[in-house]
Amino acid sequence: MMHWNARAKRSLARGATALLLGLAGCTGSISEEPGKREGPRPAPGASPAEGPAKGSPVVPDRELPSSTRAADGFTIECGPNKACEGEDSPLRRLSNHEYLNTVRDLLGTQSDPTQAFAAETVIDGFDNNALTQLATEQIAQQYHAAARTLAAEVLPRVETLVACDAASAGERPCAETFVEGFGKRAFRRPLQASEKDIFLRLYDKAKGTGTHAESLAALVEAFLTSPQFLYRMELTGRTAGQAKPGEALPLDGWEIASRLSYMLWQTMPDAELMEAAEAGRLRTIEQIAAQARRLLAADRARDAMKRFFTSWLELDTFRDVEKDPMVYPEFTAEVKTELVAEVEAFIDHVFWERKGNLKDLIAGPTSLRNAKLAAFYGDGLGAGPALAPVDLSRGKRRGLLGTGGMAAKLATVHDSDPVKRGLFVREKLLCGHIPDAPPDVMDIAPKPDPAATKRERFEVHTNIGGCDVCHKLIDPIGLGLENLDGIGRWRDTEKGKPIITAGQWAPEDGGGTFTDSVGMLESLAENPRVYDCAVKTWMRYALGRSEIKRDLPTMTKLYERLRTSSDMHELVLDIVQSDTFTKRVVAP
Amino acid sequence: MTKTKTMRIDRRTILRGAGQIGLALPLLDVMQPRRAHAQAADRPRKFFYFHTAHGIYKDVWRPQGEKITTLTDYLSPFEKHKNELILLSGMRQAGGSSSHNNGITCLTALASGGGGPAREVDGLGISFDQILASKQTTKMKSVQLGSKAGGNSAGNRAISWAGKGQALIPQNNPYAFFQQLFSGVQTGGSAAPAPAGPDIEKIHARRGSVLDAVRENFALFERNVSSEDKRRLDAHLTGLRAIERELTSPGAAPGGMCATPDLAAAQQVDWNANDNVPTIIKVQMDLLAAAVSCDLTRVATFRLVGAWGLRDHGSFIPGCGGNWHHDIAHAGGVDKRHITISKWYYQHIAYFLDKLKAIPEGDKDALYNSVVMHSTEYGGNENHHGHADMCYVLAGSCGGKLATGINKIYPGTTTHAPIFTAIAHAFGMPQTIGDPKFGGTEPLPGLLVG
């Protein structure tokens, strides 16, 4: 266990630079002759990559992140796909999941048109990043097809979507009521006069050849195909003369309602949020925080938060975890189900019972077990059919990475895999980026060896120039978890030799040593980069975009608060009250 | 204002559609009267690209001699088609560097980027299939297919790009693919009787009006959004225009071979189940062949299996169970199981060649007028993870423009970009493909006839 508090900030201030230099070293290529290494690439910040050097084997071009650093050490990296100078309120197309939730709330449908939708491109784990949301022909078509299908489905009950009795009020007045009432819910704000006009003209045209109901269904089809429905558009500050370029304008209540709702429920605002927006009760940060507390306390937040953690920690790949039955006959379908359930229950427990305590997520001594899991782990901890908290502090399992499910997921079909585990920590918990391995790297990668331990085999990574620069950021962490085998059972030996888990943190992590996974995870839970990473991850998700330089003041504040509290519920409430969440800067 | 073409549909057309589909999609664009087609000899050219993972052992794969006489065991699934085969190897992949991801961008022939979040986005520019697709006038300019084997995780899936950062994600669900291809006009619930002549005009008119209103909505935001957002809205609008094309030319059916495939087969398969991969691939191939027979599309890419896709082939390829495909490929040396898996995918590609061959086009067939291409994301050496010594299987002469029955080895200084350039020439679209530094300025020597 190392001493953090005194030197954490100092080392972090150094950290960003050190990590970047480290990555720069990573880009030296392995030439066709194994072991021979080319000179390092130019330092970051030098001119952009100019393509492969003449006469050399194909050298990957790697644009390296450049870094913007606040005085306290919080960092924002700019580079490929990181629009550091970008718009702080880009159009955000609904993710497939948001679309599904939204049409279900809007239309009361039970069908799922998103089954036929193209999967989203995921960036930093999330499917809601504006950067990747360019609609291709395929995507425009899928929305149109879904709108037609849904409009056809609601046709028999379309007149019930907005209360209006056409028999007494008249069809045309009811059409107006429909455009206003349904439109407000579909566009998540009242319609402007020009918009009402477009829809009423469509109604009139459709009414020329069809019934009142058919014409309303045509409106539904048009609403669901329109950009105001498919994209979250924040219009504040977009009218010429409304504000000076660079000025931060508070978003209006409707825009705040959508931000809150899509962040915490992944769907359109509910009636109460709509009423608050309508009545101007989403103006102060106290009002916004009160609504956020209400949303977070509701059942619907459960699913959304579960999806948040699934995206962040890549938990959706469990279903593809397979093991070689010759090596791991114990890894039955039933065991797999239980291990996945444990991880999900663990995340739920940390977020809902422990207020999202970040230290618990990484190094907490509690997991959720039942009798089947107790039997699988063989430590007697866990009883009965239902998963319930058990205290693991007498043993050596800690936090998320101590669960058998994560250990099995971050492994190969027949063995543990220190690189997968180390990369998970480096990329998901520390928000670091490790470039792809250089060409023909498999010629020197660790070879299968029935007699050697993982540590012995993976030494090749640190002995060969060119590999070490990245692998010293990965392997020691993974090797620290080597007591967990390929399906997450505890072991003290491998190939008849004692497992050595002791290791050293890279200088960019503050240096220091650890002797076992408990020490490694406990020091990880104190690493400022973990808090930096949690803030970035939540903000990316909440804003639907990558961080930009303008976010620095907000993120720095959030980071400082989280460093003190470790409480991600507080972080959520801090985010929704921050300037970045409640205001929009008018583009220069 | 949208102009929609008047389509007349008679009762028999509807009955024909209903009989073939057997399930309740109320009204389909395929039921449109078959458009008279030109009898000209110059049939439309077609391009189909199939992608699998993990390289090929070139020394085991390569037959003897420049003209194909005897195929190796590796290539034996193509025995029936050996006169139509084009084997190209030895060149390196343009833009390849080290990783699976860089190899997957094969169709762009552009220098691939590095790691970090870029690996989840990839796509440095338009891919070759989309260059061809941009000139097509069929209902679907192109289609992108996949199977469960391509992997279900959202990233790392595309092999086609409409442009930089515009990944075209393969459709893994045959039922959704069926709907995309064969449905267009739908009315109410399944119990509703299929509309007759005047009804379809009404439906088309209403769809046109809806699209007009949607376009007006887009126009409201043209001015007050950032240039980046405007690019987004414009791309979306362009996509909507494709729907209009669908309205006005809902598919033609040359040769009287246009047959709607069995929807039930597409609907019943659980496309998420590993063990269904053989069925999924077959159904997707059947649908694609049906689309070709109805001339609904002429360009397709199909990711049969991805590097991080199917973990275990054991349940349908005996002797290949227990290990992840990736681990087998990287086990070192020549692993027979990797060859067995490669051959298994070749068999499916050969199945598609059979299907094309069975579609008559004048005195030739659809295979004659097509070029089918297969590659993996890695080169021809053991241990892979490099892009030297690539091995490409092509089939079909693209309307007599490509030399077939050949087995050519190219120097390692060549890249694969000129293959695409040659195909572009065969399509009558001579142009540089990929980054010019990779040599795609000129067609690959020896590939074009004459």
Image (cartoon, coloured by chain):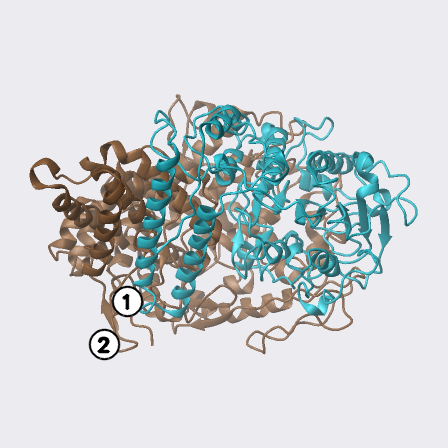
Chain colours: A brown, B cyan
Q: Chain for mark 1?
A: A
Number of the front mark, 1 or 2: 2
Q: Chain for mark 2?
A: A
The alpha-carbon separation of the residues under discs 1 and 2 comes to 15 Å
- Compared with residue B403, is residue B349 higher up or lower down, i.e. above or below? above
Residue A27 tag number: none
Instruction: Spot the residue most to the top.
Output: A384
Residue A203 location, x and y as percent? 23, 47
Q: Residue at x 17, y 40 (%)?
A: A162
Q: Amino acid at mark 1?
A: Arg
Determine the secondary structure under disc 2.
Answer: loop
Picture quadrant where residue B420 is located:
bottom right
Instruction: Give whichever of A182, A314 is nearer the camera.
Output: A182
In the picture of the structure, the residue carrying the numbered disc 1 is A584
Q: Is residue B230 left or right of residue A422?
A: left
Q: Is residue A248 visible?
A: yes
Instruction: Spot the residue most to the left.
Output: A168
Residue A426 location, x and y as percent? 52, 55
Determine the secondary structure under disc 1.
Answer: strand
Q: Amino acid at mark 2?
A: Gly
Instruction: Give whichever of B46, A63 is nearer the camera.
Output: B46
Q: Residue at x 23, y 45 (%)?
A: A295
Instruction: Give whichever of B2, B446 is nearer the camera.
Output: B2
Instruction: Spot the residue most to the right.
Output: B65
- Compared with residue A317, is residue A62 higher up or lower down, i.e. above or below? below
In the picture of the structure, the residue carrying the numbered disc 2 is A241
Badge count: 2
* Quadrant position of the C terminus of chain A in the picture: bottom left
Residue B283 location, x and y as percent? 59, 31
Instruction: Give whichever of B367, A24 is nearer the camera.
Output: B367
Label 2 CA crowd tier, 10 Å (few <14, some 14–19, many 20+): few
